Amino acid sequence: MTPFDWQTTALLVIDMQRDFLDPRGYAAKAGLDIELLRKAIPGVARLLKAAREAGILIVHTREANAPDLSDVPPTFIEASRRTGAEVGSPGPLGRLLIRGEAGAAIIEELAPQGDEIHIDKPGFSAFEGTALGSMLLARGIRTLIICGITTEVCVSSTLRTAIDRGYRCFTVRDACASAYPDLHDAAMRMIEVEGGVFGQVVTADAVVEVLDTV
């Protein structure tokens, strides 16, 4: 793992929320295998522990939309309807993928602590329709350690936006997960094409080893 300046580095934890990781949430209702998604939890927990001990900035995201659905693209509503888990429809954890509902909350074992930032995003990229970019800029952040779910959707969308904005990115293979293992693997392979066009793929062990020296 290439050395980085921890003072300008943030850990970005993508969408580790109940709607994706609880058997009563959106992902399960849409027919996804949440046990595969939950494989990201141990790696994310290790990264959070190391980042907290090192004192680097931690940002948690949640895919959660406005109650009136004003920030949801019609195409996403249509796609979610086809899965049987329409955004905004009622479920055991409240309305699916809606801000303020129980399902939108980050799972207890990975919940934000202290002054860690948490942002709600209406789309797939954590930069789109949020204050993430301005928050990072104000804090002088230039490097992102990215983990979370799902690898091929929100993680990849966020990573690509970050690269376009000039961030140096490390994506943590064993702290990301997908309900489709082949897509997880493909998304990871795409990162390092052409000499690392989308940054580097690393392991949680490698990140923890570096943060332990901070």
Image (spheres, rainbow, N blue to C red):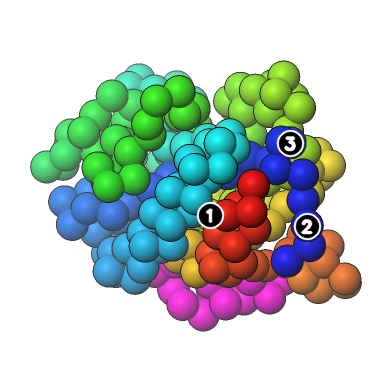
On whether residue 156 falls in the magenta region, the answer is no
Disc 2 residue type? Answer: Pro
Q: Which residue is mark 2?
A: 3
Looking at the picture, tell me which residue is in the foreground, 74 or 168. Answer: 168
Label 2 to label 1: alpha-carbon separation: 18 Å
Q: Within 10 Å of the Cα at label 2, are there few (<14), some (14-19), or many (20+) other Cα atoms?
A: few
Label 3 to label 1: alpha-carbon separation: 17 Å
User: Can residue 156 be seen at all in this image of the molecule?
Assistant: no
Disc 3 residue type? Answer: Thr
* Tag of residue 87: none
Disc 1 residue type? Answer: Cys
Q: Eyeballing the image, is 65 above or below 163?
A: above
Number of numbered discs: 3
Cβ atoms under marks 2 and 1 closer than 8 Å: no
Q: Earlier in the sequence, mark 2 or mark 1?
A: 2
Q: Residue 69 location, x and y as percent? A: 39, 26
Provide the secondary structure element on which disc 2 rests.
loop
Q: Residue 119 location, x and y as percent? A: 48, 28
Provide the secondary structure element on which disc 1 rests.
strand
Residue at the right extreme of this rendering: 194
On whether residue 190 falls in the magenta region, the answer is yes
Q: Earlier in the sequence, mark 2 or mark 3?
A: 2
- Give the residues drawn in magenta, as a range: 178-191
Q: Which residue is mark 3?
A: 8
Q: Residue 155 location, x and y as percent? A: 56, 53
Looking at the picture, tell me which residue is in the foreground, 23 or 196. Answer: 196
